[in-house]
Image (cartoon, rainbow, N blue to C red):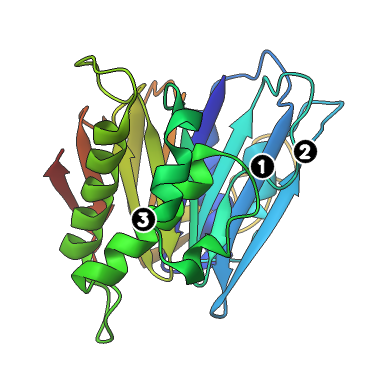
Amino acid sequence: MTQLLGYICSNSSLTAHAVNTVRREAWPEQATPWAATGFGWIQESRTLLRKHPHHGAPVDMLGLMADVSARSLVGHMSQNTNGGVDSLDLQPFRFRKWVYAQTGKIPQFESYRSDMLAETPDYLRRGVRGNTAAELLFLRFYHHMCENGALARGGVHGELIASALAETLSEAQRYRASQDEESLGLNIVAATERFLIAARTGPAMHMRLFKGMKHPAEEPLFAGHRPKTVEHPKFRAAFLASGLQPTQGDWRELAPQTITWVDPTWQTQVLPF
């Protein structure tokens, strides 16, 4: 089993409090330790990765996330690596100012991988280091963003980025060796500075928006102690992930066959796929 998470916020110093909310409202108990985990994030215009190919003990992904000082990040977790995974194939992947991860597999991908590579510009092909479909789809996504002007200067163009991701998924569907009518079964999360986007064609994904943040000023010092509450009314954030089990809070499930992103006003936008 594999899972994804994505996060974007206006103030990374409050991420730990957002994480506490996610843990309390929707994060399930981990029955089986993750075999491999990874984070990708953007920090001061640099894309950074932290990957752990093998774990011998349970890993607190939310705890690790809270320690990352970033306004946008992507996480990937896997319980079954079939005996191990090459670090080059471990997700997330990065290219320039983007990080990307996905879950799900493309049937018989090896049979048309070379064709997809041949259609990929040379400067992107040189960036392929592993053998996964995820890495190549990421670079195809980047290519489509370049082609449709999504990466042009002048701010984030959410609709064009979503259109590029939709084209990437359509391309993968067209290339499929098995000509059935089933959906791809992929979930994707990608992020750049101040922008987060997700595609769902597979298992359930849920999202929560944060508008303001309240938290205790300190830990309780004794039984019955009620510390002063600190408020941050201007804080904004969005957290999304697969494999959640929301029991409370303002969570919503991403609709199947859609692409969802958070715009600069912290509203969610949706493009059916």
Front-most of 179 and 150?
Answer: 179
Give the crowd class for mark 3: few <14, some 14-19, many >=20 residues within 10 Å: few
Q: Quadrant of the C terminus?
A: top left
Q: Residue 223 in the image: x percent, y percent?
A: 71, 34
Residue carrying label 2: 53
Residue carrying label 1: 90
Which element type, helix, strand or loop, lies under badge 2?
Answer: loop
Q: Is residue 250 visible?
A: no
Looking at the image, tell me whether mark 2 or mark 1 is earlier in sequence order: 2
Tag 1 near tag 3, CB within 8 Å: no
Question: What residue is shown at x 52% (from left), y 48% (from top)?
Answer: 135
Give the crowd class for mark 2: few <14, some 14-19, many >=20 residues within 10 Å: some
Amino acid bearing label 1? Leu
Tag 2 near tag 1, CB within 8 Å: yes
Amino acid bearing label 2? Pro
Residue that protrudes farthest toward the right in the picture: 56
Amino acid bearing label 3? Glu
Tell whether 92 sits left or right of 49. left
Which disc, if any, is residue 200?
none
Tell whether 59 sits left or right of 103. right
Residue carrying label 3: 119
Q: Is residue 55 visible?
A: yes
Question: What residue is shown at x 46% (from left), y 39% (from top)?
Answer: 113
